[in-house]
Image (cartoon, rainbow, N blue to C red):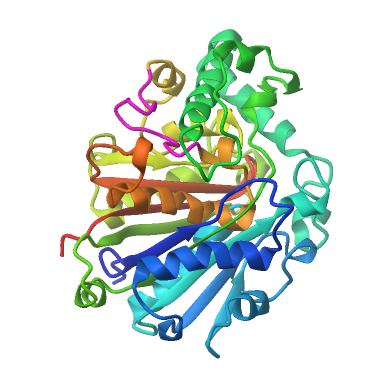
Amino acid sequence: MASGIRDKVAILGMGCSKFGERWDAEPSDLMAEAFEECIADSGIERSQIDAAWLSTAFDSVNVGPSALPLATSLRLGYIPVTHVENMCASGTEAFRGACYAVASGAADFALALGVEKLKDTGYGGLPARSRGVTNDLFAPNVSAPGAFAQLAAGYRGAHGIDRDDLKRAMAHVSVKSHANGARNPKAHLRREISHEQAIDAPMVAEPIGLFDCCGVSDGAACAIVTTPEIAMTLGKTNVVTVKALQLSVSNGEEIGFNSWNGAHFKTTRIAAQRAYEEAGIDDPRKEISATEVHDCFSITELVTMEDLGLADEGQAWKAVLDGRYDADGEMPCQIDGGLKCFGHPIGASGLRMLYEIYLQFHGRAEERQIDSMRYGLTHNLGGHPVQNVCSVAIVGHYDG
């Protein structure tokens, strides 16, 4: 019977480029920037990498529809290199491929790298996609802000929340993340904002205002994984392992309005429950020390706290206003600034989230450092509330 990959895979090294409007860099430059930090951190040679995974989402406009750009940009050996795309969970999808290769024994060292150059598309938001069902059949006339504004309406309606209360909570999400991002030299947006600025900002899609939206950005992040045993033979003493890695994809039930009320993400609830079981976590509110969740919009982060079981049903907005997820709160969320301050170069975001949690476990987060880390959780959500893909990863110190 399947038992998962808990403690079968160790993160040997990670790297992350500076995120932002990187007009100075090609995708290959961003890949090299993240990889050079990662390979130095890992302590191995490029020639020791057995297999690699590349994640991008809009490959037709910046990187290319195959894995060749990764192999050529990094001058990898003639090894298997696979291109993956799974909407906004693409970065974690690449990480999943690398982890499964190591857990299965197919590779001793595997690389996962995600990159995106969204600024090069010329769009203020996400560009239109021209392949598959995503653009042609699924949502030809739905914008991302419009779809997530409907999530906010569904959440308010399901729980009887006053509009002004929800707006204040959404503003607090953004203010908190901007305060964190201001302390991160790799973030795109590094300026604090006030609650008044967030609440009074121009409206994008009621109730989502300008500061409720994450930005458009360029960036890359990567990881090299191996087994805990190999990591220790290389002299690693503070080994961080994967405790759980789960993926859930909508089957169409939500879009059919069967039993879904529009106030939460079924995929997140399913992926989170599976991840907790795989990691052996009984009480996530007590055992998880920090989270990096998919804050494409402030309402998404707020609702995700409930979907992950980190707030009571219909009560996340109160927990947000109480400061539970602030940098000095019980469970810091987006301690690095999140998508709100990094932007969302889609192929890179999942790995960028893991990078911050990895730094926290190694005590290398500088001003953002959390005092004590037991488990760290990352969460990606791709698509619209009515149909999406969700990934949940949990990492922690090796206790094998």
Residue positioned most to the front:
24
The rendered magenta stretch, by its main secondary structure, is classed as: loop
Foreground pick, 255 / 390: 390
Q: Is residue 158 visible?
A: no
Compared to residue 130, the image places residue 213 above or below, namely above
Q: Is residue 68 left or right of residue 227?
A: right
Residue 233, by quadrant, is bottom left
Residue 392 place in picture, x, y as percent: 43, 51
Q: Is residue 301 visible?
A: yes
Q: State yes or no: residue 333 in magenta.
A: yes
Foreground pick, 185 / 52: 185
Foreground pick, 157 / 232: 232
Quadrant that contains the C terminus: bottom left
Q: State yes or no: residue 50 in magenta.
A: no
Residue numbers of the magenta segment: 323-337
Residue positioned most to the bottom:
78
Residue 120 place in picture, x, y as percent: 78, 54
Quadrant that contains the N terminus: bottom left
